Amino acid sequence: MIKGIYEFITEAQLKKYAELAVRAGVNLQKNQLLIIHSDIQNATFARLIQTVAYEAGASNVFIDWTDEQSTKEFYLNAADSVIDHFPDWQAARFKEWDNAGAAYIHIISENLDVFKEVSTERISRFQKASRTKLRDYYAKIRSHEVRWCLLAVPYAGWATKVFPNLSKEEALQSLWRLILKGSRADGKNLIKDWESHNRAFESRKKILNGSQFESLHFKNSRGTDLLVGLPKNHLFIGGGVIDKNGIPFFPNIPTEEIFTAPHKNKVNGKLVGTKPLIYGGSVIDEFYLIFKDGQITEYYAAKGQEELQSLIETDEGSHYLGEIALVSKKSPLAQADTLFYNTLFDENTACHIGIGNASPSNIQNGIGQSEEELKAAGLNTSLLLVNVTFGTEDMKVVGIKEGGTEVLLIKDGDFQF
């Protein structure tokens, strides 16, 4: 048995989870470079992924360590000139890795209190500087030119936040169980389970893409009444995706969403958030957004108003949407009926939007088009993409075709196709 947060999972279970990340997540190829981004608190799992990757034939596995406590000290004490600067050598690493054909695995573990003493403004400034320098890398990520996978392991503070009425040990055990169940990583044959999961995605995407809806209308009892216009020749994607070399992979573990890009200037109405948004280590809760001609013209949060403002004011594109996603209430994560306080998990429990950048993969032949061509097609451009959950048990989604024909897509939170 592995100690610490890992004493609540067997080594065999943990290795299967690592194999899922390597063999299905990034679908690592023989003699390929793998980069693992991990905080030092997740060293046990990172090293296990490294071992599994070498067993799968990796040419090299480099672990890019981070340390949340050191990062906190940086935000608190670094000179202003440093906060506004992302070093060239950091950007050069990503360029060299991309040129070498690397795949990327990101291990996350929510620590909600680590940055509570830090100025939101300083975090936002550094994130803007880093996103600007790494623009090319993020463009490759969004267009699936490189293969990547994001997955999570528990953290004691995160577990007790999700399960406040349990002891630390019981909370960690419960969160492990939900992570594995939600990630479809608790069965006997994980790869086959994910292949079956992906077939359901493919069937629904075929129907949506064949319909070519002009808009989607979202409505529920919480106050959401949102009309989302879609670009011509849009594509819904989700589940497994294909990289530029035709190799399939799963960017998110877990994943339950089918999503496309809205038309930048054709979103109107009100969206009421239904789960807290975690942004820059802060919690934004009890909030709404109002859209006119695509732009967020009004917003309010009972908790985290300053953080919400910082997000929306990042750049011109962060006033618009880059993603609209359909999710059924019958997914394993939704059925858990749990607030995860983590965007990767909460967004996979219900319908959500993405504030910011749109993926060129969401229109036909979008990959390879210039920024000007994508803009002309109606896709938004921004330094960021932040997902906001607004789905509910009584969510209704209607697809509206050119000419006004309506098709019921979601009723009472569940797919009707």
Image (cartoon, rainbow, N blue to C red):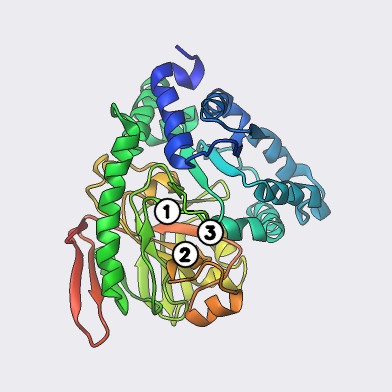
Residue placed at 73% from the left, 46% from the top? 93
Task: List the residue tagged with mark 1.
Answer: 241
Task: Say left or right for 226 vs 319.
Answer: left
Q: CA distance from mark 3 to mark 1?
A: 11 Å
Q: Callout 3 environment at 10 Å: few (<14), some (14 to 19), or many (20+)?
A: some
Q: Quadrant of the C terminus?
A: bottom left
Q: Are marks 2 and 1 in contact (CB under 8 Å)?
A: yes
Task: Say left or right for 6 vs 313.
Answer: left
Q: Callout 2 environment at 10 Å: few (<14), some (14 to 19), or many (20+)?
A: many
* Element class at badge 2: helix
Q: Is residue 394 placed above or below 151 in the rendered structure?
A: below
* Element class at badge 1: strand
Residue flagged by tag 1: what amino acid is it? Val
Residue flagged by tag 3: what amino acid is it? Arg
Question: Which mark is drawn over residue 142?
Answer: 3
Task: List the residue tagged with mark 2.
Answer: 361
Q: Are marks 2 and 3 in contact (CB under 8 Å)?
A: yes
324 or 270: nearer the viewer: 324
Instruction: Residue 251 in the image: state x and y as whole percent.
Output: 46, 48
Q: Is residue 149 placed above or below 288 in the rendered structure?
A: above
Residue 271 picture quarter: bottom left
